[in-house]
Image (cartoon, rainbow, N blue to C red):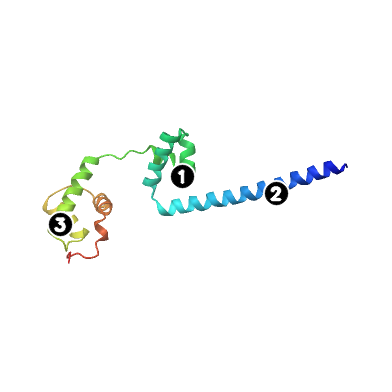
Amino acid sequence: MDASLVSQMKAIEDANRQLKRMYAELSMHADLLKEALEKMTGPSHRRDMAEKAVARHKVSITLACRALGVSETCYRYSPKLKDENEEIADLLVGLTDARKTWDFGLCFLHLCSVKGHPWKQKRVYRVYCELELNLRTDPVGC
């Protein structure tokens, strides 16, 4: 082999080694970001981020969902009965403001038994948690 070919081969090997190192770092970085993204945000937030990526960057739905860890079913899901959820939220806020010592159980019993609403406990609890009423640490408000 010629000396110039050997030097070119070494230069190519060095460039290849650098590219492999850069690829390993970037893939590790992407994995860490994906893991942090999954821990920091819920599926609904990742869904919103996927919608923004499709709208702003003109990427396909499949690519956006795969990158953000959202299933395409979750991306295309549209919740129903939003008006009733707002009614539940208004009633829950009114109850917890009027009776600060009531937790979810008492609020749900009041809504179903006294007011006669036919809502299921799981639905009312979901709205209760979305309003962050389950995070009250000082029920008296002192």
Q: Amino acid at mark 1?
A: Leu
Q: Earlier in the sequence, mark 2 or mark 1?
A: 2
Of residues 61 and 24, the one nearer the viewer is 24
The image quarter in which residue 80 lies = top left
Contact flag, marks 2 and 3 (Cβ < 8 Å): no
Q: Position of residue 50 (x, y in %)?
A: 42, 40
Mark pair 2, 1: CA separation: 30 Å
Q: Which residue is mark 3?
A: 97
Q: Secondary structure at mark 2?
A: helix
User: Which corner quadrant holds the C terminus?
Assistant: bottom left
Q: Position of residue 59 (x, y in %)?
A: 47, 34
Q: Secondary structure at mark 1?
A: helix
Q: Which residue is mark 1?
A: 68
How crowded pointer 1 is (Cα within 10 Å; few <14, some 14-19, many 20+) is rated as many
The image quarter in which residue 95 lies = bottom left
Please give the name of the residue rendered at 46% of the width and 40% of the height, measured from the top-left corner: 65
Please give the name of the residue rendered at 49% of the width and 38% of the height, measured from the top-left corner: 63
Q: What number is the disc on residue 51?
A: none
How crowded pointer 3 is (Cα within 10 Å; few <14, some 14-19, many 20+) is rated as few
Q: Amino acid at mark 2?
A: Arg
Q: Earlier in the sequence, mark 1 or mark 3?
A: 1
User: Which corner quadrant holds the N terminus?
Assistant: top right
How crowded pointer 2 is (Cα within 10 Å; few <14, some 14-19, many 20+) is rated as few
Q: What number is the disc on residue 17?
A: 2
Q: Amino acid at mark 3?
A: Asp
The image quarter in which residue 7 lies = top right
Mark pair 1, 3: CA separation: 38 Å
* 111 lies left or right of 7: left
Please give the name of the residue rendered at 70% of the width and 45% of the height, measured from the top-left corner: 16
Q: Position of residue 134 (x, y in %)?
A: 26, 59
Q: Nearer the viewer, mark 2 or mark 3?
A: 2
Q: Earlier in the sequence, mark 2 or mark 3?
A: 2
